[in-house]
Image: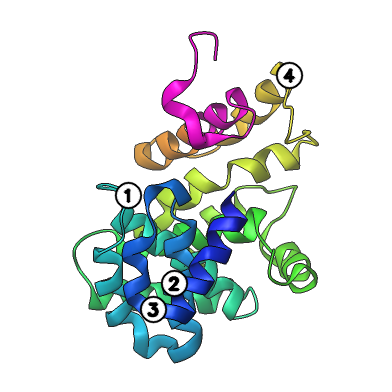
Amino acid sequence: LHLLGHAVGDILYEQRGLEGITVCTDDFRNACSHSIVVGLFLDKGEGALPDIAKACEGAPGGSGAYTMCFHGLGHGILSAVGFDVERAVSICQKIGKSVTKGGEGPQCIGGIVMEIVGGGGHDKVTWEKQRKKYLQKLHPLSLCRGTIIPQDSKFFCYVYITPFLWESQGTNLGNPTASDFENTFPICGQIPKNEPQNWDACYGGFGKEFVGLAAARDIRRVDQMNDSQ
């Protein structure tokens, strides 16, 4: 469904440009909006950032649609620059300096982290090569703990690093077991307790994964999950 949303967004961008984002209803779970803003970035580069910000203001999907629009842009920027995380982060930071409604730059960087962890759909070969550069199984928090991710964005790095924490412990991501949780939770405990926001983000990242697991990865009907789920 997510990939279909991207395809719809690509066609809408061809037909209507940025205005197409108003058609991207929440049924597409932000995927449609992502394709439109990424399309403009691919066409015009960094000079398009102000127009992208304006387009994100019109993204349907409720109060979170605006910031999730920038999250999706982060995915696209990383892909567009050949999965060079440093360069992509630099571009996202420029958004944060030029647009100040709140959270644009960090949300964009969160999209970068999510893409390097579990993306690569546009160029699997380059993604796999670059991924080894930024993600280390022996030190699974190194991307978030290092200097590549700026301080104001580390929270989102910890939120979206979760699947790699499981991967570092040999977990079957489609069906993690109780023992996998026991092995992986202590990784978050490596974060100093004088960083309570990062501590919460790392453990909270598991919470977002639990929802998907209980719903068999189909997050379209989360509001209809039964008591057992």
Q: Quadrant of residue 116?
A: bottom right
Q: CA distance from mark 4 to mark 1?
A: 37 Å
Quadrant the C terminus occupies: top right
Dot label at residue 61:
1
Left of 103 or right of it: where is 147?
A: right
Pointer 1 with pointer 2, Cβ within 8 A: no
Task: Assign the magenta stretch its main secondary structure.
Answer: helix
Task: Choose mark 4 or mark 2, whichever is in front.
Answer: 2
Q: Quadrant of residue 215?
A: top right
Pointer 3 with pointer 1, Cβ within 8 A: no
Residue 143 at what x, y percent from top left?
A: 58, 57
Q: Which residue is mark 3?
A: 16
Residue lying at 36% horizontally and 85% vertically, measured from the top left: 48
In the image, 228 versus 153, the foreground residue is 228
Looking at the image, tell me whether mark 4 or mark 3 is earlier in sequence order: 3
**What amino acid is labelled 1 in the image?**
Gly
Q: Which residue is mark 2?
A: 36
- The residue segment tinted magenta is 205-229
Task: Choose mark 3 or mark 1, whichever is in front.
Answer: 3
